[in-house]
Image (tube, helix red, strand yellow):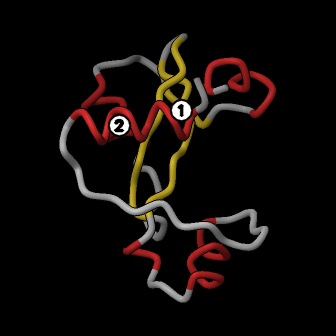
Amino acid sequence: MTCVRRLQEYLDHHHVHYEVLGHEAAYTAPEIAHTLHVPGKMLAKVVIIKADQRCVMAVLPSNWQIDFARLKASAEVSSCATGHRRGVQGAVS
């Protein structure tokens, strides 16, 4: 199951309203927001995090940055960092 499909199923299960928008090729959340002509706070981004030895998805407004200390405390893990593409590719596809 793809990362996008997994997220959609989670949101649907929890009755969260969202809209999936297509856009031109862009590689950062600010570029995508600009392409769609929407403010960054209205666009969600998915960041893959390696928390201890697990890969998890963090979904946040595209104009936010992750506070890793706060994430560690709330997830009750000893370490967390953004996942490298090679290391997380199998976990999200």
Of 67 and 31, which appears nearest the observer?
31
The C terminus lies in quadrant: top right
- For label 1, the SS is strand
Could you say where residue 21 lies in the image, as x and y percent from the top left?
53, 67
In the drawing, what numbered circle is on residue 71?
2
- For label 2, the SS is helix
In the drawing, what numbered circle is on residue 37?
none
Q: Residue furthest bottom?
A: 37
Q: Residue furthest top?
A: 53
Image position of 62 with respect to 82: above or below: below
Look at the numbered discs 1 and 2 and tell me whether their residues touch, using CB distance below 8 Å: yes
Label 1 sits on what residue type? Answer: Ile
Residue pictured at 50% horizontal, 56% vertical:
45
Could you say where residue 9 lies in the image, as x and y percent from the top left?
37, 33
Label 2 sits on what residue type? Answer: Leu
Tell how many labels: 2
> Would residue 59 be found to the left or right of residue 35 on screen?
left
Image position of 34 with respect to 46: above or below: below
Of 51 and 10, which appears nearest the observer?
10
Of 82 and 37, which appears nearest the observer?
37
> Would residue 14 be found to the left or right of residue 59 on screen?
left
Within 10 Å of the Cα at label 2, are there few (<14), some (14-19), or many (20+) other Cα atoms? some
Residue pictured at 50% horizontal, 28% vertical:
80
Image position of 72 with respect to 39: above or below: above
For marks 1 and 2, the one nearer the N-term is 1
Give the labeled residue for mark 1. Answer: 49
Q: Nearer the viewer, mark 1 or mark 2?
A: 1
Residue pictured at 25% horizontal, 57% vertical:
17
